[in-house]
Structures are given as C-alpha cells and as structure tokens.
Image: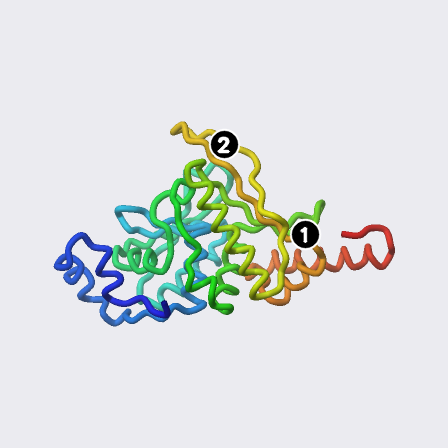
C-alpha cells in the first residue's frame, strides 16, 4: 500500500452517503502518499498522542511547546488543518501542554494510516506494514517513536523503549515489538536485546497492565543508532553522543567495557 485513497477513508463511515457528504471538502487530500513525514506523524500519535474514538479527535501532548508547534506545522502543511496549544492543568507530574485537533475526517485518515483508536494500552494494533517495509518511512517512524517514548540509561548504558499493554492484548504488543526489533536489524543492522516483560500495574478499572521493554545495549549499536536514526530532540541526541564518548573513553583507559 503506497497511498490512502478516498475509498479507504469512506469505508470508515457507517454509510457511504454519510461518508461522501462528510468528505466532500477534502477530495484534495487524496490519494495521500504514504511518506516518511506521514510515518513520523503516525509514530507521534502512537507515542505521545491519542486518537479519540468515536469522536475521531487527535490529541498530542508534550512538555515542550516547540515540539507541539513542530507537530502542528507538519499537519498544517500536509492537510491545511491546525489548532491551538493549551496547558494541561490536571497533570500532577509536571507542566505539560496539549494540541487538540477536532477534525473528524483527519482522524479517520490517520486511522487508515495505522494509528490505533481509543486507549492504546487496551487496544490491539499492528505495526503498519507500509512503514516496516520501507527503510525511509521506518527511519522516520523509529526516530519519532524513540523521541516520544525512548529513554537513555547512563548507569546501565542503553537506549530503551517501553510501552504498557493490558494482559489481554499483551501478545499483540509482543508482536509489535518483535516487528520493530527485526526491522531495526534488517534496515540498519542494529541488534537489540531480547524483548522482555516486566512490572505490572493494577488500573482503577481492575485491568492489569504489563510493561514491554526493548533495549539497545551494545556500543556498536549506539553508534549505528546515532548515525542512522538519531533523536530529533537535540538534548537527547547530545546525551547519546556524550554516552558514546564516555564509553569510548572508558575503553581507551581500560577501566570498563560494555
């Protein structure tokens, strides 16, 4: 699949007549080329975003106003849709901001591109095949997903990605991670540790969630990730470079290995 067509999105409506009426102003979007830029938006929404259902509203949250402005510019350039940024007042963990896009039609387009709808932790969704098969689309997707969800461990050196999944959809989450792991190896020769499941959390609704973890541990893989993918956030990319330099220095001094 290289494009999202008018018919693809039309099929998300209960009736053809309702879909044709709702999409009448958006014919110029189609056919929509499935590009690296679209892959990055899919990753943003899988990471720090949320596609509400049945409202089809898209929310993107970040502690960085600059990051939300970047996301807003990309959506504006591609679809001519934009919104305003507001502070999330209910967040007790720190100051964060939200960009909400109330465009039902765009939400359906992104669903057709592979964005899951509803609560991601409770929902089964596949790794989009059009992204995993294309090197440049996968490069941008992974860059954005690790930018949203990835962490750098300095004490036990590693680049790590974590996602929480409810027990009933845990197997689906493992398949998602395995696809990501194999695609990193196929496209960039980056070898990850085995995927493992840790921790558990009891939600207020009584459902139990588990944490899926993918970690890159070897020095050679850090360098490949830095050169081939990297973090778009400068602070994270600089931190990765510092980690690489620190490990190289330790190796030279003979005080530690990895």
Give the position of the N terminus as an image quadrant. Answer: bottom left
Position of residue 102 relative to residue 35, above or below, is above
**Left-right relation of 239 to 84:** right
Structure colour scheme: rainbow
Label at residue 201: 2
Residue 178, image x, y percentages? 52, 52
- Identity of the residue drawn at 70% across and 61% down: 220
Residue 33, image x, y percentages? 36, 71
Label at residue 149: none
What is the C-alpha distance between the residues marked 1 and 2? 26 Å
Instruction: Using the image as rendered, state which of residue 91 and residue 162 is in the foreground.
Output: 162
Q: Could you say whether the residue bearing mark 2 is in a helix, strand or loop?
A: strand
Q: Could you say whether the residue bearing mark 1 is in a helix, strand or loop?
A: loop
Query: Can the viewer see residue 77?
Result: no
Residue 28, image x, y percentages? 25, 72
Marks 1 and 2: CB-CB under 8 Å? no
Residue count near mark 2 (Cα–Cα under 10 Å), binned few <14, some 14–19, many ≥20: some
Query: Can the viewer see residue 182?
Result: yes
- Identity of the residue drawn at 65% across and 59% down: 238
Label at residue 217: 1
- Identity of the residue drawn at 59% across and 65% down: 188
Instruction: Using the image as rendered, state which of residue 93 and residue 159 is in the foreground.
Output: 159
Instruction: Using the image as rendered, state which of residue 1 and residue 46 is in the foreground.
Output: 1
Residue count near mark 1 (Cα–Cα under 10 Å), binned few <14, some 14–19, many ≥20: some
- Considering only order in the chain, which callout, 2 or 1, is on the residue closer to the N terminus? 2
Residue 22, image x, y percentages? 18, 59
**Left-right relation of 57 to 148:** left
Determine which quarter of the picture holds residue 246: bottom right
Q: Extreme left residue here?
A: 17
């Amino acid at each position: 699949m290289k494009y999202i067509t008018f018919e693809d999105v039309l099929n998300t409506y209960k009736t053809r007549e309702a879909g044709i009426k709702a999409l009448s102003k958006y014919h110029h979007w189609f056919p929509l080329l499935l590009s690296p830029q679209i892959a990055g938006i899919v990753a943003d929404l899988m990471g720090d975003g949320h596609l509400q259902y049945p409202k089809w509203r898209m929310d993107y949250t970040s502690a960085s106003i600059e990051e939300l402005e970047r996301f807003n510019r990309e959506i504006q350039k591609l679809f001519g849709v934009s919104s305003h940024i507001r502070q999330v007042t209910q967040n007790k963990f720190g100051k964060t901001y939200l960009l909400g896009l109330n465009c039902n039609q765009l939400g359906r387009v992104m669903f057709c591109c592979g964005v899951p709808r509803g609560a991601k932790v409770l929902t089964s969704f596949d790794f989009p095949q059009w992204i995993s098969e294309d090197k440049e689309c996968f490069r941008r997707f992974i860059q954005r997903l690790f930018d949203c969800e990835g962490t750098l461990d300095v004490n036990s050196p590693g680049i790590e990605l974590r996602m929480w999944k409810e027990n009933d959809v845990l197997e689906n989450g493992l398949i998602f991670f395995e696809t990501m792991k194999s695609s990193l190896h196929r496209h960039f020769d980056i070898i990850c540790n085995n995927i493992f499941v840790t921790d558990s959390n009891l939600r207020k609704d009584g459902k139990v969630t588990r944490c899926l973890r993918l970690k890159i541990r070897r020095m050679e893989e850090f360098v490949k990730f830095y050169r081939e993918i990297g973090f778009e956030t400068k602070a994270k990319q600089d931190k990765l470079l510092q980690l690489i330099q620190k490990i190289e220095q330790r190796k030279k001094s003979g005080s530690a290995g990895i």
